[in-house]
Image (spheres, rainbow, N blue to C red):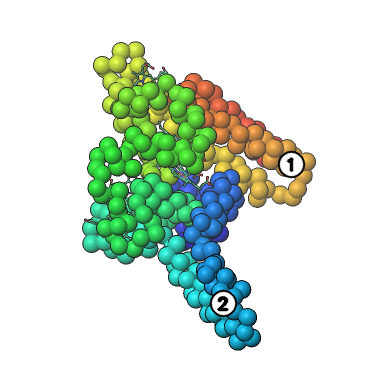
Amino acid sequence: MGVGQTRSVDPDNPKDVFDTRTPAQSPIEFNATKLNMVNKMRKQPAFSIPSSLIFSSVRVSHHHGWVILFLTILVLMISGRADAQADRKKVKNSCVECHKQSTGNPEVDRHYFQWEDSWHAAKHVTCDKCHGGKPDETLPAVAHADILESEGKKTASYYLKMDTKCGQCHSEEYVDFSMSSHYRFLEEGEGPSCITCHNPKTGHTLSVQEIVASCVNCHNEKLKGYEHIPRVARLLLDTLSYADFFVQWAQEFIFLKGKATKEKAWARSKLVDAEIELFKSKKQWHLFNLNDTEAHIKKAIEFALEAKKLVD
Ligand code: HEC
Ligand code: HEC
Ligand code: HEC
Ligand code: HEC
Ligand code: HEC
């Protein structure tokens, strides 16, 4: 799937159904494009005439010398272009090109299929961005160089390292998360990381059950005074996805309702307020401030309700 195309929608994911943005509207777009351009520029072969040739042209005084030189340059230019074309082919990400086809290992292929239809794929967040390796090499042994050799904690995709990897692009969430009280648990080697709650391939937020199960690892009867946290977390996450859904629904409702009126314009601005509250609630969640998360979710729902009432 290329840039500018809409990704296919997962009908089981309520967020997906309403997420009608095209990849081109994303705020990270600019950086990703710039990064791609820089990479392409680096790999573009510089067309240069060997210096020996230039010097020899000074020495050749005979008329024919210039013709020969001209022809040589022409040949060089043509072969230079062929080189550039071959190189452009090489620039295509070898990880993706090869993993597109079955590797014969369904466990490995599963990761490709998950990635294929995601925002990450649409935005060229290719395998090597997280796994390392050499995406210009076509031989698996060479391409996999530092992936397969190193195992466990040394692997680039080891989960404790993932937060900084994800953070290279999602700096805002990373900054929030690293300021949370739980970041130090991660540094000590056991806390939640980005991929405790997000599928790294698709970026999808995991199910409420999956996320809450990870809290229970620590928040159980052994952690006195904090045993209630998983229950609160479950309630909050359910309410958050309801709020996401409700705000989107109110948007559709108001969009379809009657002609442009003053009330409709007010309703629209209320919805913007609701979106801002949703955004703030997610920020507070990444900071592990559950109380503030809840407060912003409630406000989002209130704003959406007010918006709907204005046009009812
Ligand atoms: C020419 C084909 C080819 C290329 C190029 C290639 N791979 Fe693979 N890759 C494979 C095959 C085949 C396997 C399955 C190996 C197995 O099952 O033993 C695999 C396995 C993997 C695995 C799983 C390793 C594990 O420990 O189980 C990862 C991760 C991976 N590749 C990432 C990458 C990345 C990242 C790149 C680019 C830098 C890349 N691959 C380039 C063919 C390729
Ligand atoms: C945004 C980061 C990210 C991208 C992009 C990504 N992966 Fe992964 N991948 C991970 C993480 C983290 C793990 C380990 C945790 C897990 O299993 O979910 C992993 C695990 C895997 C595994 C299981 C074996 C192992 O090494 O743990 C395979 C195979 C794999 N990825 C292949 C790929 C292929 C092929 C691509 C490109 C089509 C790709 N990945 C793109 C982050 C990523
Ligand atoms: C090389 C840059 C890059 C890396 C590395 C990366 N992402 Fe992303 N991610 C993106 C882009 C670009 C999007 C597209 C959506 C956007 O622009 O907000 C995206 C989308 C997402 C989304 C969905 C946002 C939405 O609006 O639906 C989540 C969640 C996400 N990534 C989490 C992760 C996690 C977790 C990791 C690490 C395992 C990771 N990302 C690694 C660039 C990256
Ligand atoms: C404890 C669970 C948890 C952890 C840890 C976590 N997230 Fe999230 N993240 C969520 C939830 C819940 C949401 C909001 C639901 C949603 O929008 O899908 C969210 C939303 C996001 C979004 C925005 C998606 C959107 O809809 O706009 C991005 C991007 C993201 N997280 C990236 C990260 C990154 C990067 C890390 C690690 C630095 C991280 N998250 C750590 C649970 C978590
Ligand atoms: C590695 C263990 C560990 C995991 C996993 C864990 N926590 Fe905690 N959490 C703790 C400890 C220990 C405390 C006690 C307070 C402290 O030391 O900061 C705590 C306290 C809290 C608090 C109280 C406020 C605060 O920051 O002090 C909240 C809220 C919280 N955790 C939420 C969660 C949620 C939600 C999850 C699951 C996504 C989770 N925790 C997963 C260890 C963990």
Image height of 29 relative to 302, above or below: below
Task: Determine which residue is flagged by label 1.
Answer: 265
Residue 292 in sight from this viewpoint: yes
Q: Is residue 198 above or below residue 229?
A: below
Binning the other alpha carbons within 10 Å of mark 2 as few (below 14), some (14 to 19) or many (20 upward) gives some
x and y percent of residue 58 in the render? 61, 73
Q: How many marks?
A: 2
| Crowd rating for badge 1 (residues with CA inside 10 Å; few <14, some 14–19, many 20+) | some
Instruction: Work out which residue is located at the far right of the displayed protein and give it.
Output: 262
Q: Residue at x 47, y 71 (%)?
A: 83
Residue 273 vertical position relative to residue 135 in the rendered view, above or below: above
Considering depth in this image, is 195 or 133 the residue closer to the camera? 133
Q: Earlier in the sequence, mark 1 or mark 2?
A: 2
Tell me residue 248's x, y (percent): 57, 43
Q: CA distance from mark 1 to mark 2?
A: 65 Å
Is the C terminus in the top left, top right, bottom left or bottom right quadrant?
A: top right
Q: Position of residue 186 (x, y in %)?
A: 35, 27
- Residue at image location 49% in from the left, 29% down from the top: 176
Kindly indicate the quadrant of the structure image that contains residue 218.
Answer: top left
Per the image, the residue denoted by label 2 is 73
Q: Which quadrant of the figure has residue 159?
A: top left
Answer with left or right where residue 20 lies relative to residue 258. left
What amino acid is labelled 2 in the image? Ile
